[in-house]
Image: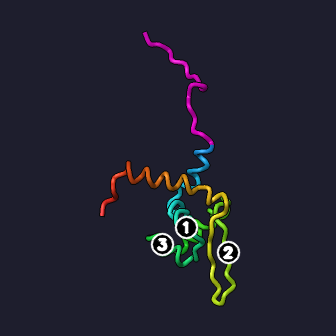
């Protein structure tokens, strides 16, 4: 004789809304490395592209726009000449520093080295 199982929605643990929002931003490829470069100082677009190996100009531009829309990055135009664009973290972006450093340390301890 089969035992009927009753589903209790209260017993199911849901994903925390804050975690979902964090990974919607930080879980996108390139966003973490971009933010980590900007932790040190404001950076010009070309320097940022060189600092994040493998990212295209278009992808960098798209990700920076997303990070700006999320309130983590500010775009600033240096009038020049020459005209240059730089990016810096907002207060909200800078507040990620302890978390990003903790993630870096966790990765060094718990994730295997990437293959060559």
Residue sitting nearer the eye, 59 or 106:
106
Residues at marks 3 and 2, CA–CA distance in whole angstroms:
19 Å
Q: Spot the residue most to the top.
A: 1
Of circles 1 and 2, the one toward us is 1
Residue at the location (34% across, 52% down)?
Answer: 112
Residues at marks 3 and 1, CA–CA distance in whole angstroms:
12 Å
Tell me where residue 59 appears, x and y as whole percent. Answer: 54, 69
Residue at the location (65% across, 90% down)?
Answer: 81
Q: Considering only order in the chain, which callout, 2 or 1, is on the residue closer to the N terminus? A: 1
- Graded by Cα atoms within 10 Å as few (under 14), some (14 to 19) or many (20 or more), the crowding at tag 3 reads some
Residue at the location (59% across, 39% down)?
Answer: 16
Report the predominant secondary structure element of the magenta stretch. loop
Residue 18 found in image quarter: top right
Residue at the location (58% across, 52% down)?
Answer: 24
Q: Quadrant of the N terminus?
A: top left
Tell me where residue 65 appears, x and y as whole percent. Answer: 63, 67
Tell me where residue 8 appears, x and y as whole percent. Answer: 58, 22
Q: Which colour scheme is used?
A: rainbow
Does residue 102 lie above or below 66 as drawn? Answer: above
| Dots 1, 2 in contact, CB < 8 A | no
Residues at marks 1 and 2, CA–CA distance in whole angstroms:
16 Å
| Dots 3, 2 in contact, CB < 8 A | no
Does residue 14 lie above or below 102 as drawn? Answer: above
In magenta, the rendered stretch is: 1-17
The local secondary structure at tag 1 comes to helix
The residue under label 3 is 51
- Graded by Cα atoms within 10 Å as few (under 14), some (14 to 19) or many (20 or more), the crowding at tag 1 reads few
Please check the rendered image and state whether residue 65 is part of the magenta-colored stretch, yes or no.
Answer: no
The local secondary structure at tag 3 comes to helix
The residue under label 1 is 40
């Amino acid at each position: 004789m089969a035992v009927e199982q009753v589903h209790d929605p209260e017993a199911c643990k849901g994903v925390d809304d804050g975690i979902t929002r964090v990974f919607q931003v930080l879980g996108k490829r390139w966003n973490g490395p971009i933010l980590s470069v900007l932790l040190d100082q404001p950076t010009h677009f070309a320097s940022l592209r060189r600092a994040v190996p493998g990212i295209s100009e278009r992808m960098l531009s798209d990700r920076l726009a997303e990070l700006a829309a999320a309130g983590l990055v500010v775009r600033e135009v240096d009038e020049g000449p020459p005209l240059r664009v730089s990016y810096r973290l907002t207060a909200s972006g800078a507040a990620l520093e302890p978390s990003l450093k903790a993630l870096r340390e966790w990765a060094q301890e718990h994730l295997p080295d990437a293959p060559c």
